[in-house]
Image (spheres, rainbow, N blue to C red):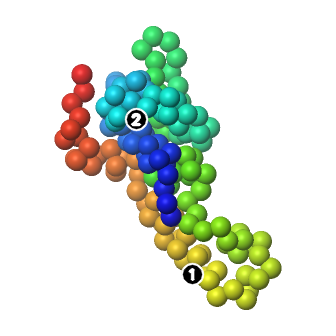
Amino acid sequence: MLISSKGRYALRLMIYIAAFGDEEGKIALREVSEREKISLKYLEQLVRPLMHAELLRSVRGKGGGYVLARPADEITAGDILRAAEGTTATVACDGLEGACTRADLCSTVKFWTGLEKAIDDYVDGVTLADLARAPEIHLDIERK
């Protein structure tokens, strides 16, 4: 599976919000942009699918920003990647969805199914809270 910049940056955005949100948990995208060296316009595009997936919500008004829509320990890396990328699939195979007429004859469907399960088990087994607690993310970041 090749994770695009959308998936990588969405994960970084969510980790930053989980680790460094203020008392109410909110963070301005401008801060994330400056600290993570990700274009503000790109972050603005990334928040849309994350909000649609009910992983983030916006806080309007003075001092507004974005907050997690659920506790960090209830959001998995898989949730974030699926919201940003659309899927965690490694291969386009109709047999994985039961839509292939050759699935019972194909020698690779079981392999792809096993690979998909291994990836899903891993990304769904790591929570945003786990990632936000990783000590290495705090080394280079000193909030203002």
**Disc 2 to disc 1, C-alpha distance:** 37 Å
Query: Secondary structure beneath disc 2?
Result: loop
Q: Which quadrant, please, contains the C terminus?
A: top left
Disc number for residue 111: 1
Look at the image and tell me whether residue 21 can be seen: no
Label 1 sits on a secondary structure element that is helix
| Residue ID at (45%, 10%) | 62
Task: Give x and y (percent) for residue 104.
Answer: 73, 86
Q: In percent of the image, x 46 and y 23: which residue is there?
A: 65
Q: Is residue 79 left or right of residue 133?
A: right
Location of residue 122 (image quadrant): bottom left
Count of marks placed on residues: 2
The amino acid marked with disc number 2 is Ile
In this view, the mark in front (2 or 1): 2
Amino acid type at image mark 1: Phe
Asked if residue 102 lies left or right of residue 57, the reply is right
The foreground one among 42 and 116 is 42
Residue corresponding to mark 2: 38
Q: Are marks 2 and 1 in contact (CB under 8 Å)?
A: no
Rendered residue at 52%/25% (across/down):
58
Dot 1 alpha-carbon crowd within 10 angstroms: few under 14, some 14 to 19, many 20 or more? few
Placement of 53 over or under 144, stated as above or below: below
Above or below: residue 131 compared with residue 98: above
Residue 133 in sight in this render: yes
The residue located at (55%, 70%) in the rendering is 116
The residue positioned farthest toward the top in the image shown: 62
